Amino acid sequence: MANDPTLSFDDFAERLSPSARLFGLDLGTKTIGIAVSDGGRQIATPLMTIRRVKFGKDAAALLELADKNEISGLVLGLPLNMDGSEGPRVQATRAFVRNLSALTELPIAYWDERLSTVAAERAMLEADLSRKKRAAKIDAAAAAFILQGFLDRLANRRGAMAP
């Protein structure tokens, strides 16, 4: 796509150092769920949720957190429709990424986020969390599902490339 500042999965993977930590982001209209990987990029952990205000403040808060957590790349959930088509939420995500990429050198990649919120909700129900606790944590948990999918693919890629 023209003017798309994101990297392909392989290009993103090539830019990472062996101990690079990543953020997974679930971009919503009201919040941004954030998950973080460990240095070995094996496990995604929900970190927090930022309540969205306006782009400038949202981006500043996100990039400050990335700096504080020594993050080397951003993985954003791409909210495709179930049939794989792109709707208004994908357009909003792409616009956010275009604007964010002007403020940071961090590599950015997309990850198909279909069903990530559903999976996060199921996991929380199985953990018997109350509705109030689920509502407070769902976006960060969805970000962790997004990031974990990306980390699993990175691990499979490394395994396939091993001699």
Image (cartoon, rainbow, N blue to C red):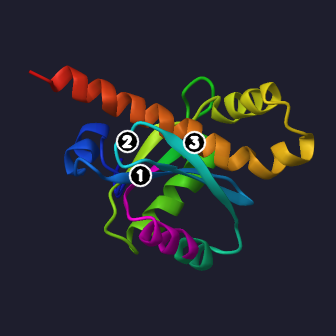
- In percent of width and height, residue 151 lies at 40, 36
Query: Given the current orientation, which residue lies at the most extreme right position?
Result: 131
From the image, tell me which residue sits under label 3: 144
- In percent of width and height, residue 115 lies at 65, 29
Q: Quadrant of residue 92?
A: bottom right
Between discs 1 and 3, the one toward the N terminus: 1
Q: Which residues are magenta?
A: 61-75
Which mark, residue 41? Answer: 2
Closest to the observer, 79 or 105: 105
Secondary element type, mark 3? helix
In-image side of 55 versus 123 (left or right)? left
Which mark, residue 22? Answer: 1
Residue 33 visible to the viewer: no
Tag in front: 1 or 2: 2
- Residue that appears at 50% across and 75% down: 64
29 w.r.t. 62: above or below:
above
In-image side of 130 versus 31 (left or right)? right
Q: Quadrant of residue 119?
A: top right
From mark 1 to mark 2, how far is it between C-alphas? 8 Å
- Under mark 1, the amino acid is Leu
